[in-house]
Amino acid sequence: MSWQYGFEHGPGNATTGAAYRAATMPRGAALAQRAVALAPRSSAAATAHSTALLLDFEWAAAAKEAQRAIALNASDTDALAWLTKIQTMQLDMGAALGECSRNCCRS
């Protein structure tokens, strides 16, 4: 059986959850920022930075960076797809919060 995402020796040996996030997010975010610094006109670097921002729960900044990626290269299908995903997630989160306020959070 082939495992993915750090599960090389089975899921019991994988680093998961908060510990995995704490170990990987700072480095990933730093690498994405460095990519933008090295290639500020690169749509791919902007898309990677957008991904890091989203994974750090900075939704508005992630959408803005994805829009910048598209402005740099309007035919970059990765940037277009990523912006669509971010906007869909924002809509889904808004709908979930609205549903919660109507049904879950009644006093």
Image (tube, helix red, strand yellow):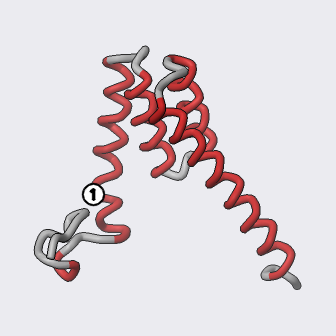
The residue positioned 86% from the left and 75% from the top of the image is 102
In the image, residue 34 sits, relative to residue 24, either above or below, namely above
Of 27 and 103, nearer the camera is 103
The residue positioned 66% from the left and 52% from the top of the image is 90
Secondary structure of the residue carrying numbered label 1: helix
Q: Quadrant of the N terminus?
A: bottom left
Q: Quadrant of the C terminus?
A: bottom right
Residue 55 location (% of width, % of height): 46, 51
The residue positioned 68% from the left and 60% from the top of the image is 92
Q: Quadrant of residue 83?
A: top right
Q: Quadrant of residue 60?
A: top right
The residue positioned 30% from the left and 35% from the top of the image is 31
Residue 96 location (% of width, % of height): 72, 68
Tell me if mark 1 has few (under 14), some (14-19) or many (20+) residues whose alpha carbon lies within 10 angstroms of its own.
Answer: few
Residue 77 location (% of width, % of height): 48, 32
Residue annotated with mark 1:
23
The residue under label 1 is which amino acid type? Ala
Of 97 and 43, nearer the camera is 43
